[in-house]
Amino acid sequence: MALNEEDTKLTPLEFACSDLKTLLQTSSKMEESLGKMDKKFDLLDETLSTASRRVSPLQSLAMATKALDTRINRAVTLALALLESFKVTDSLQLKLLELSSILSAETTPKKRLKKLLNYVDCVNQLNAAINSISQEGEPVIQKLQEVVEFLSRTKATDQDRTHRLRETLFTLKALYENEVDAMKFDGLLDEALLNLQDEYESILQLLRHQNIKDQVQVDDKEAEIVASDLGTELEVEVLQRISETLAANDCLDICIDIYLKVRYRRAAKALMRLNPDYLRTYKPEEIDAMEWETLETAISLWIQHLKFAVKTVLVSEKKLCNQVLGNIMDGVVWPLCFLKIADKIMAVFFRFGEGVARSSKEPHKLFQLLDIFDSLEKLKPEFSDTFEGEAGADIRTRFRELTKLLVHGSSKVFWEFGLKIEGNSDAYPPPQDGSVPKLVRYAINYLKYLTTDAYKARMAMVLWTEQMWKVGTLSKPETDENLLQDAITNVMDALHRNIETKRLSYRDKILPHVFAMNTYWYIYMRTRNTELGKLLGDEYMKNKYKVVAEESAYMYQKQSWGQLVKLLDKEDLKRQSKEGLGSLARAKMEAFLKGFDEISQRHRGSYRIPDRNLREQIKESTIKLLVPVYTEFLNTFSAVLRGKLYVNPDQLQGFLGHIFDGSDAKLKGRDSKDRMVGGNSLSVEGEIMDFRRSRSISSNV
């Protein structure tokens, strides 16, 4: 039983041992086979290495051949393209000659312009072809030269081919060096550019400003002025294309010179058609030497012509300049060109305006200075638009400087006017007849004219502007009207002081009252219900002038006619006896008539009341003062006055009327023997002149 168990365990071990022996035998055979395979692989590897060493030179030769072929083909292709460019250039030159002949034969303006566009296109094409040759020639020749040198060095091809390629290189190089500069600077292109310059100048000459005199209307200062186009669309297009072509061919300076020369002359001639001969006079001393009417006309024309130049001529020139030169150098050129044209024209206008502003500060120049100032204020928006940007800075600066000169000049004229009035008291004596002085008439008319709608706002603006410059922009100056009111009040006060000084210089007791009555009444009557009176105020005018005039009238009547009333006083006659009563009554009557005659003589020769209304009031007042007293005295003492015939009350009233009416008259008695006591005849002689205000306010203060 035990043996069987051991046999069972050994049997598997025996089988395993047998399998191991078989596996070892198989591994030994496989190892022997692998060794044989290694020998075969080593032999194959050696064979491949030998083949590779033999094929490698052939592969390098093929690659070199292919690279050489590519290099030669590239150089030759570029050379052929260059030769083709020369052919294109030749054909374009022939075409340019043909177009030039056609252009010369064409006489119709519109058709000629269209053919000129074709001519410009051909010039541009020729220029592009020549530039292409110029830019590509050197690189092409350089590449071809490198190929020739390589072939010569490597002997990659036969000598004949290398020789032919070298000859081709020399021919192409000589053609490039000799022909390109000739085509660019001495050939048909250069001649064509000269022709375009002539055409350019010719077309610019044709573009004129039309209907110049029709647009400037002397009698209608507010007439609408509108800028017009200077050329048709076709003309502008041709000019634009020519300018671009000239700029592209290094002729920009010539193009600009032609444009500036022609367009400045055209703009200047347009303005010269307005006959601005006054612009030749511009120095302050020359302005002062001009006749006033001539200067006044010149300033009026200057305002109109400046407005026309800015709003029409220069606006049109600016538009044309933009159209023609706007595409050159990204639009940098045209503003400078326009400003060069405008600067020469505006300089002439500025020069005259500055001469007027710097001339002597006579009072009558104020209104012309204000006219100029107002015209500049109205032109300010157009000025800013027309001369915009950095290029127009110089013209805008000069515009502001002229405005400053006008503001300072106008203010100075006005302030010096007040000083001249106040300092005039010693220079001119008062009128010997008590009438209104010329200075007063002139000053009131001057201020009335200044406060009209035409000048009130302008003067106020000038005063406000100068005040703002003095106090600074951060301060708040007074309003325009307050400044003007204060300024005119100062002049009126100066005039008042002048009148009072003259009033005190009279030696006659009655003349100062006549003078004050006439003068203050004149001022009040001439200013009421006017803009001047409204500006100064009713209370100011009444208290300052009307009241004083009435007081002076009262004193005049008291000092002259009131003394006659005292002569007919009846109180002392009541204490006289019958005999003494008649003698004293006749003496009073004779004294009255004698005094009446003396006063009438003074009115005829020394006293004048020019104002008709004032004269009527004084006449009525005097009649009411004298005639009732005279009538009562004559009636009361008629019994003791018998034996002499005296003037009756109606005749006395009529004679007073003759005195104040200023007519010649002789008072007649009740018969041919009627005489005044003492043999003096009553008469009125002389003439009282009516005041006539001069239409001109240009009299010297």
Image: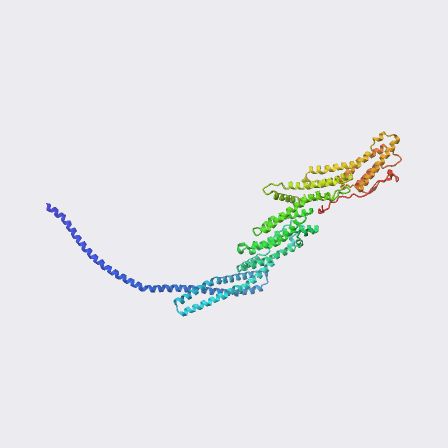
Against 193, residue 642 (above or below) is: above
Q: Nearer the viewer, residue 456 or 489?
A: 489
Which residue is located at x 10 percent, y 47 percent?
3
Against 314, residue 446 (above or below) is: above
Quarter of the image where one finds residue 412? top right
State which quarter of the image contains the N terminus.
top left
Quarter of the image where one finds residue 322? bottom right
State which quarter of the image contains the C terminus.
top right
344 left or right of 553 in image? left
User: Residue 76: in sight, yes or no?
Assistant: no
The number of numbered badges drawn on the structure is 0
Return the x and y of residue 521 as percentages of the image width and height.
73, 39
Q: Residue furthest bottom?
A: 160
User: Residue 410: in sight, yes or no?
Assistant: yes
Return the x and y of residue 236 as percentages of the image width and height.
57, 57
249 left or right of 464 in image? left
Q: Nearer the viewer, residue 215 or 124?
A: 124
Return the x and y of residue 25 as percentages of the image width and height.
18, 55
Return the x and y of residue 294 as percentages of the image width and height.
69, 51
Quarter of the image where one finds residue 690? top right
Q: What colour scheme has been applied to the protein in the rendered image?
A: rainbow
Against 233, residue 459 (above or below) is: above
